Image (spheres, coloured by chain):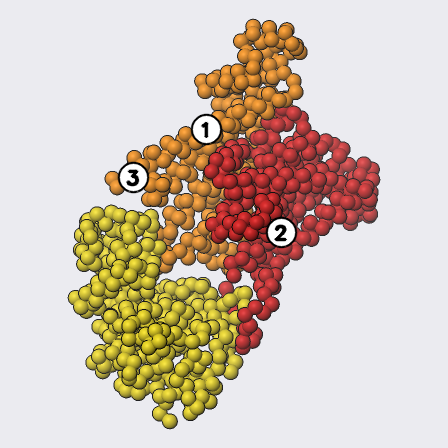
Amino acid sequence: MKFTYRQDVDTVSEYSSFSAWKSARRGDRLSVIYGLVVVCVVLVSYVLGALKWLPHDPEAMDLDAMMAAPFTGSYLLGTDFMGRDMLTRLILGIQAYFLPGLLAVIISLGLGSLLGVLAGYRGGRAEGGVAYFSNLIDSLPRMVLMLLVIAAFRPDIYTIMLVFGITTAPTIAMLVKSKVLMLKERNFIESAVALGLSPAVIIFKHILWYNCRALLLIQATIGMAEAVLLETSLSYLGFGVQEPTPSWGNMVQAGANYLMQGNFWPSTAPAFAIMLTVLGFHLLGDGLNNIFEWKQSR
Amino acid sequence: MKRFPWKASAKVLSRELAATAALLLGVSLVVFVILYLAPGDPFAALLGGRTLSGAERDAAYEALGIPKTWYGQYLAWVGNVLQGDFGISTRSGQPVAHELISSGGKTLFLTVGSLLVTLGVAIPIAAIAAVRPASRIARSSTLLVYLVSALPTFWLGYMLIYFFTKQLGLFPILSATDENQQLSWLYALLPVVLLGLGNGALSEIVRYLREEISRVMSEEYVRTARAKGASIWRHAYKEALLLPVSQIIAAKMPFVLGGAIIVEQVFNWPGLGRVAWQAAQDRDYPVIMAITLLAAIVVRLGSFFHRTVYVAVNPRASHL
Amino acid sequence: MSEMTNPPLLRIEDLRTYFYSRVKRAFVRSVDGVDLEVLRGETLGIVGESGSGKSVTMLSAMGLVTTTPGVITGKVTFYGGETPQNLLEGLDAHVNVERRDGRIMQASKDNQAWQKQADQNLRDIRGGKISMIFQNPRAALNPFETVGKQIAESVRLHTGIKGAAEAKEKALYWLEQVRIDSPGMRYNNHPYGLSGGMSQRAMIAMALAAEPQMLIADEPTTGLDATIQARIVDLLDDLKARLGMTMVLISHDIGVISRLSDRIAVMYGGRVMETGPADDVLDEHADGHPYTRALLSSTPRPENVTASGHLPAIEGEVLDTINVPPGCRFKARCQRMNDAVRARCDSREPDMFEIAPGRRIRCWLYSPQ
């Protein structure tokens, strides 16, 4: 693999136009762009779905055009096995995970930051307690815990996402804690205290916003991807939204029989929607991670 | 071997064991509390389906030997579990332990097999991506791994079934009545592969391994090995392979167990995942509690395994 | 030690090793055209500030530079085998450079193919014929293995000894040679259990156990305590006398260099500024490169302290190897520039002028005109 290294000018000035974006690798830039596109599409679709500005009636069944391929007539993405417009159902499927996913992310970031700061700032027993709590939660596989909670409470998706948020908080707590410890070691916190800043200001402005926002943002993208996978998996298993309300998970499940007969579309369309969305969040997080990490190391 | 610090390592590991026990105790408490807070009476089955309250219930409990306080019930449950009694399934009326054993083996097979598949795929890709990062094979395989990790496992499972049965006619799907016979090995391969590829953590595993291998390759002692003409892998494998792999096994075990639930659903595989799903459907508390506990135990076993490898490989570990 | 009586063991010609800064989108010209010779049986001291490229030069010669782009041009001839061998053989096949006004502005390199080629070229040389020891010995030794096993590995790889027991015996022998305390116990220690000085001794033992023709010591005393530094220097001096080996010693510490070197090469900004017999180079009252003079008068010695109680420092900053100015690399900090040479110092880089056999200086003050 030949690499070409080029230098355009004879003299390079020290601080000339350092832009993390421009110096980033092409793969990272593409990842971030793709991720942002996905986020926009999801957002727009969510709004469309919430306002019910849909291309077709989600429940209207066109018996003449069952399992139609994309671009058949007015059906941009074809129809499912009952002749319902696929695009409409896919858009509506976002309702099932969008707000709940946001809730999960907010909870995990909030709780995680709180625990992380507590553990890092106070140290000692607080740190030990947070570590114990984290390890405890990490010992429970998410799916298994969900089944437990479902068996007990038959909860709605928001409660499920609440629990999910709690289960992802420990990872964030650990990351925030190590940041706090690093800042402590570099005497940032000591100097801030010496300057007379209140703990609240130190924590929110200096620790979290200045130093942790990149990592929190990236964890948010990961969390959203996980939320999508969780919601779709649960509705696949039959525990999420029920028919006829569409969720990408239950759409795949319902189309399974038809897949076995060779009619791929009803199952594959939502599956690809899941893949493209999850990929979008993952790549966004990865790309940003690489760009930020590298910006710091320079 | 005689220079290996056995005693110090044993001390470190027994501390780990104690920590594990403390964690599992916490897990059991969490599990119990969740179900205690659930609506409905967990002992409804024992009460013959009657809903009692107040004094009547207390009397019935006393007659059945059920403690009245929550911690009493908790301790009774834990005490039973430690003796191997996981209660009676409210659905089947059979002892839960019995179900665990009969289905557990199938899930164990699935889990272990899928770990082998995951590692067998991830290690080569990570190694190539670390050593020759810009080659076509590294880039394309990394991209492929990302795609596969983003695909919903259940859909991938259906596609696999379709292609292998309809197109290749290779693995006829045997019906669920195949539970008691030996597993026909061909049939068994598909779900193992699916779980190995589709546990959702593959891209992260590849990325982590690649970073570790890269990092170790640029360590100073590897440079010394190269400078003295020695085999680089022989010096690097402990830190680049053994430690990261054991870390992966420990950290990703929850994903594997969770993924098993989905995979068993797709293939109608008679393992603990399907039992758990059924228990969630039926609100079969003893079963779901037992499975949750068991899952936590397996996860902690994975952690313990990682610590053991760490202590065995790292000469300083026993001195900390 | 003249070049007539001692043939060269290693010759480096026009070596260029560049690194690429993605941040600045420019080349770091770490080694920018280095010519060096190591004569048989001598100790060549390479001295220079950090960033002068002295370590990278020898690392490049051994094919140990893996960061891209790495070595771009150059020829390294090793005379220790039956026939002279170019260690950088095949480099041109994998590299394409583009120059503008004599300066390299673009380089295309197939690093993976080149690395493979280099490993092949150097397979018999590394360890067996040329051994290398590094700074920071505790990090440079494998932390997961005992020190003894690592030394024994050198023995088994490069001497004819294959048996485990014999290799161990040899390893213990070398541990004794480096005068480590309780060799038997140290054999079973892991690197973390050894102090800096002891692990450096162990690394020296490991390098010598392969019975190489040449030893490259890259900053062997940097990072050690001052008293330990002195002991390691003593050890190297002792080994030099007893084994008569050829050695390349890289250091920024003039004291160490002066103790051990027969000949000295002074590097600055990726180029060799001056070479010659140690006594001549270190003699501040004789002819010499302005940089070397400045270095010598700024080392902490009582003689250097002026009447007013100051220790002179070299003015200016270390050369930025990204922006290499035209003309002499040292011109910004040179105290001895005069009007006769100023024009040339500003515009053209001086060649190496040989003012006496074996004595070369890269400075316009010494040009024949």
Residue at image position (55%, 11%) is B66
Q: CA distance from mark 3 to mark 1?
A: 26 Å
Indicate the chain coloured orange by its letter.
B
Q: Nearer the viewer, mark 2 or mark 1?
A: 1
Chain A drawn colour: red
Q: Are marks 2 and 3 on the same chain?
A: no
Up-down: is A158 above or below B72? below
> Residue C237: where, in percent of width, then height?
21, 67
Residue C15 visible (yes or no)? no
Q: Identify residue for label 1.
A: B22
Looking at the image, residue C191 lies above or below residue B182: below
Mark 2, secondary structure of its residue: helix
* Vertical placement of residue A258 versus C141, above or below: above
Residue type at mark 3 is: Pro
Residue at the farthest front position: C308
Q: Amino acid at mark 1?
A: Ala
| Residue marked by disc 3 | B5
Residue A53 in the image: state x and y as whole percent.
Answer: 82, 44
Distance from Cα at disc 2 to Cα at disc 1: 38 Å
Quarter placement of the N terminus of chain C: bottom left
Residue at horizontal 28 percent and vertical 87 percent from the top: C356
Of tags 2 and 3, which is closer to the observer?
3
Front one among A59 and C287: C287
Quadrant housing the C terminus of chain C: bottom left
Question: Disc 3 or 1, which lies upstream in sequence?
Answer: 3
The image quadrant that residue B217 belongs to is bottom left
Q: Are marks 2 and 3 in contact (CB under 8 Å)?
A: no
The image shows residue B83, relative to residue C32, as above or below, that is: above
Q: Amino acid at mark 2?
A: Leu
Chain C drawing hue = yellow
Residue topped by disc 2: A284
Label 3: state its secondary structure: loop
